[in-house]
Image: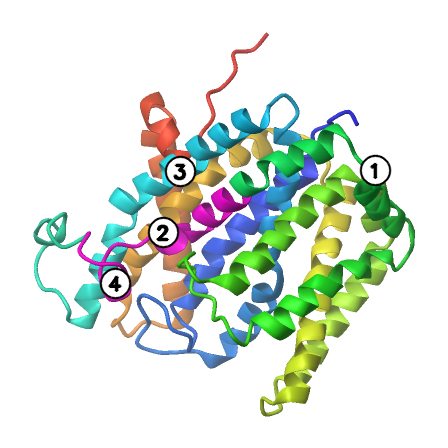
Amino acid sequence: MKNVRRYDLDWLRVGVFALLIFYHVGMFFVPWGWHLKNNVIYPELRWPMLFLNQWRLPILFVISGMGTFYAYSFRSPGQYAWERLRRLGIPLIFGMLLIVPPQVYLERLAQGAFQGWYWDYYPSEAFKGIYPEGNLSWHHLWFLPYLLVFSLLLAWPFRQIKDRPGSLVKWVGNRLKSPWGWLIFLLPLYLWEALLEPNFNVTHALVGDWFALINFGTLFFFGFLLIASGATFWENVSKYRKRNLLIGIGSFCILIFIWQFEDGVLRHFTEAGVKVLNLWTWIFVLFGYAATYLNRPSRVLGYCNRAVYPFYILHQTLTLIIAYFIMDLDWGFWVKALLLTAGTFGGSILIYQGVIAPLKWLHPFFGLKSKKPPK
């Protein structure tokens, strides 16, 4: 199958990572645990956060699996694995050494677990022990080691599937030709949600994080298969986008209803089914509307598509720096939220445009590919 660039995937990738900044700003205000918390908590904010929680990470792993299909166009498994090590491994190590330590430092200051200036903390204390007991952490960069593991483990199978699409790809294509065939993908997701999730809390620690590894790995694999099935997938998501939107809205409303009851066996197995239906439906909704309206290039997309990786690496450190200085101030929600949002986006733009983009030697540390000279 000839590879044709999907600009809608680029838009979705940029959009989901932009939502991540808003999500982390929201984490400063909601009751759930986070690195720093505002002096006033707003419980009602958990509802839009819960809505995003259902599909924002799953769709990222699906998009990453899709991107793998295109990345294999002119690469062997070895070349692909080496490219993944460079683009994921180098930014991860760089981030853990330089980007994440200020976050842990501010967290320790707020907890009263450390006193002193940053140069008293770094590097003498920054790498003692593993977080949360110690200080060494990858914090928001946890997505990178998971994606790296999936990429390396599936490098050879993916190459075989792309070179010789067989019965599996044909089966996926046939399922997607049916109006409801896409629901068959829910079966493994339901099994992981119903049987693994209660026994393995998501820790983002990689080691022992079995539910996250299996669940996100499955979504990554699904992304590759959906693209491998060809135009059938895009025809399906575009044709049924309105129907899927109604299903997505309805399934999330049912989740809200279920969450009003005490936890138990019946609620758990029912909730697991509705959760995977909801997340898979919203993934198809977003693909459907993006394929219909966003599959076209633009200069804005070109800029954002290149800047999104550095923004992802930088953003949470900027958010927490601002949060630390305003967390105890008697300002209202909107003032603090707007300051955090504008400061994070604005700071990321300034650092990217003023430092990262002009200095080519920095590009590998932020996962940027070398720009090809115009022909």
Left-right relation of 144 to 123? right
> Marks 2 and 4, how far apart in space?
13 Å
In the foreground, 335 or 363: 363
Query: Residue flagged by tag 3: what amino acid is it?
Result: Gly
**Compared with residue 313, is residue 357 higher up or lower down, i.e. above or below?**
above
Gap in Å between the C-alphas at discs 3 and 1?
Answer: 33 Å
Quick check: is 135 in the magenta stretch?
Answer: yes
In depth, the one of 341 and 46 nearer the eye is 46
Q: On the image, numbered disc 4 is attached to which residue?
A: 324
Amino acid type at image mark 2: Gly
Density class for disc 1 (Cα within 10 Å; few <14, some 14-19, many ≥20) is: few
Give the number of the disc on residue 231.
Answer: 1
Which residue is depicted at the point 63% across and 21% down? 74
* In front: label 3 or label 2: 3
Q: What stretch is highlighted in magenta?
A: 127-150
Residue linked to disc 3: 89
Give the x, y percent position of residue 173. 85, 44
Q: Contact, CB < 8 Å: mark 4 with mark 1?
A: no
Q: Are marks 3 and 1 in contact (CB under 8 Å)?
A: no
In terms of image quadrants, where is residue 42?
A: bottom left
